[in-house]
């Protein structure tokens, strides 16, 4: 009886999370879609004229889309090489004790509130960019550098798991034919973990695309199409965050419509990541051989086998 | 040139606080011969093979005593370059390792790592290695398809071919036919006997019959000790040690 009650309560909690997703989806689309139909999807996405509250309001979010794209790509350019390097170091090269420190420290980065990141970008990085490279300082470059750090936890943890999941036999097979450790990593382990690594990058993109607070603080919030990394810009998220408080009527609807676009983009990225990580799982279960190699080697070397993932 | 390719000299190996996996092994491997190391499980066979090309380096650090000499050179000397040592002493594992790439790339993998770029040289090496491993006729028409699609027996011969493409001096095989059917096993054994004219081979077979079929020399390992070593013809017919005889005649193991 008690068992069933607990089971039911857990089922209910699962249902609540699912239902909240459904409700959020429904309300965003309900509030945003009418405007998109009124303005026309093409104009809404392709025009960069945004004057939502005048006599002849114009609703074009192209400059914000481009701002989001620039910032997200910039964050990827910064975060992926760094994150991949950390993941490779921690999974393959670091002594187990050091790896045990790196992992939680990187995870700690995920716990820092984004307003703190924004604060650091605003007070330290932006002046630095302004004085050394020119421009207003509050720029795509500044935001991308900080966002690159913010997405490290997603990239590092998932890439590292993928690297650790590569069958030990691949590693030994490569080493046994005289590959150096570096060649083993670059030509065998990274390709074998590729789908997990790509998934981590996509999740990182999702995080960068969705980030709001830090972007508002660092990007300068200029309603313009950025021409260079030193320009200010606005993103989909920062525009919603800045304007929703005072928007009403069609303006408000347009912000919800912006939310719809953002929502769809993030959903697509997440689904892509799920499909890719899903493939990692499928691919591993298709190779029972590698599993039994794990078991064999573990049986033979009981003292804290490093590959125990 | 000395007749001895590898000289194992009072070699012991211990993982952590456990009893030694190898105890004071002294054993010679003759050039261009097949030495078989046999005995029941957990006798130290695998650890010895892994010590010979220093794959034990990547395990949890163990304690090592004694020496292993390849052509008179200590392979654990600080000046030894480990990757090039592993190219001289190639290793084939119990479970076939087909890397997730095409058949051709699996074989060309080692040479490419060494910097061989010329396509004609690579395809020569691939053909030579596949022929030597008795796989060429089965895969010559589909070198570009994935190696993961090969059968277990083919994948194991592929693993052997991958090692051969490195043109090593010594080939180590750890239970190379443990996961294979009798026909594939016979093919691999035939290949090995042909190969010994060019290479020195050390094999840890998974059963004593295979040891008898392929070996020139044999060493019986029990609980980390080398109980007895000598010419296979003598060791399998008139073993000197009682334990060897008991094992060969099937009283345990």
Image: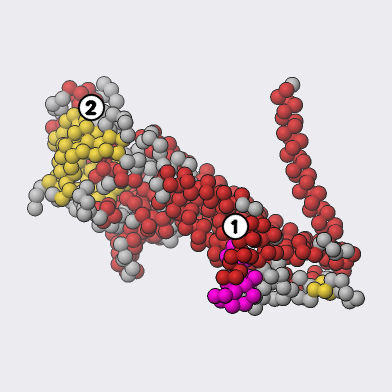
For the point 48% across and 55% down, which residue is it? A86
In the rendered image, residue B43, in percent from the top left (x then y), is placed at: 27, 31
In the rendered image, residue A114, in percent from the top left (x then y), is placed at: 65, 56
Of the pair A154 and B155, the residue shown nearer to us:
A154
What residue sits right under mark 1 in the picture? A150
- The boundaries of the magenta stretch are A129-147
Secondary element at image label 1:
helix
Magenta highlight on residue A146: yes
Q: For this view, does A46 lie left or right of residue A35?
A: left
For the point 64% across and 61% down, which residue is it? A118
For the point 31% across and 53% down, which residue is it? A177
Q: Is residue B235 placed above or below B149 in the rendered structure?
A: above
Of the pair A254 and A137, the residue shown nearer to us:
A137
Confirm whether residue B87 shows in the render. no
What residue sits right under mark 2 in the picture? B248
In the rendered image, residue B31, in percent from the top left (x then y), is placed at: 15, 48
Crowd class of label 2 (few under 14; some 14 to 19; many from 20; radius 10 Å): many
Of the pair B144 and A85, the residue shown nearer to us:
A85
Colouring chosen for the image of the structure: secondary structure
């Amino acid at each position: 009886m008690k068992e069933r009650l607990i089971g039911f309560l857990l089922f209910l909690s699962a249902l609540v999370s699912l239902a909240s997703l459904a409700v959020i989806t429904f309300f965003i689309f309900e509030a945003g879609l009418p405007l998109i139909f009124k303005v026309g999807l093409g104009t809404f996405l392709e025009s960069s004229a945004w004057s939502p509250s005048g006599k002849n309001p114009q609703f074009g979010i192209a400059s914000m889309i481009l701002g989001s794209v620039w910032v997200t790509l910039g964050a990827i350019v910064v975060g992926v090489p760094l994150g991949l390097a950390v993941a490779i170091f921690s999974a393959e090269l670091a002594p187990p004790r050091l790896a045990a420190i790196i992992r939680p420290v990187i995870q700690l980065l995920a716990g820092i509130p984004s307003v703190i990141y924004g604060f650091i970008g605003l007070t330290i990085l932006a002046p630095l960019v302004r004085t050394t490279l020119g421009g207003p300082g509050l720029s795509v470059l500044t935001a991308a550098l900080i966002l690159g750090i913010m997405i490290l936890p997603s990239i590092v943890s998932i890439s590292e798991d993928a690297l650790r999941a590569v069958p030990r036999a691949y590693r030994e097979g490569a080493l046994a034919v005289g590959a150096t450790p570096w060649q083993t990593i670059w030509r065998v382990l990274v390709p074998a973990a590729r789908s997990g690594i790509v998934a981590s990058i996509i999740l990182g993109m999702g995080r960068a695309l969705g980030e709001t607070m830090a972007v508002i603080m660092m990007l300068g919030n200029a309603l313009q199409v950025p021409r260079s990394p030193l320009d200010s810009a606005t993103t989909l998220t920062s525009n919603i965050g800045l304007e929703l408080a005072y928007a009403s009527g069609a303006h408000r609807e347009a912000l919800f419509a912006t939310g719809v676009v953002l929502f769809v983009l993030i959903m697509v990225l997440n689904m892509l990541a799920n499909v890719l990580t899903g493939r990692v799982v499928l691919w591993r279960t298709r190779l029972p051989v590698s599993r039994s190699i794990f078991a064999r080697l573990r049986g033979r070397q009981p003292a804290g086998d490093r590959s125990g993932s | 040139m000395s007749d001895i390719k590898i000289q194992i000299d009072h070699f012991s190996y211990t993982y952590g606080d456990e009893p030694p996996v190898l105890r004071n092994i002294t054993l010679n491997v003759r050039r261009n011969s097949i030495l078989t190391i046999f005995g029941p499980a957990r006798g130290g066979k695998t650890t010895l093979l892994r010590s010979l090309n220093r794959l034990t380096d990547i395990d949890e650090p163990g304690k090592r005593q004694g020496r292993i000499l390849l052509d008179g050179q200590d392979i654990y000397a600080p000046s030894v370059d480990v990757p090039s040592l592993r190219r001289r002493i190639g290793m084939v594992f119990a479970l076939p390792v087909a890397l997730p790439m095409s058949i051709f790339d699996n074989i060309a993998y080692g040479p490419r790592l060494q910097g061989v770029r010329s396509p004609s040289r690579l395809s020569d090496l691939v053909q030579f290695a596949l022929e030597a491993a008795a796989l060429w006729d089965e895969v010559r028409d589909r070198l570009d398809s994935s190696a993961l699609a090969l059968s277990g027996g083919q994948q194991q011969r592929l693993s052997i071919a991958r090692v051969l493409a490195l043109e090593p001096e010594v080939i180590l095989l750890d239970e190379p036919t443990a996961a294979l059917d009798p026909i594939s096993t016979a093919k691999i054994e035939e290949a090995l006997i042909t190969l010994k004219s060019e290479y020195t081979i050390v094999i840890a077979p998974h059963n004593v019959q295979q040891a008898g079929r392929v070996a020139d020399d044999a060493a019986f390992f029990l609980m980390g000790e080398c109980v007895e070593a000598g010419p296979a013809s003598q060791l399998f017919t008139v073993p000197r040690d009682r334990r060897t005889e008991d094992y060969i005649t099937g009283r345990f193991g």
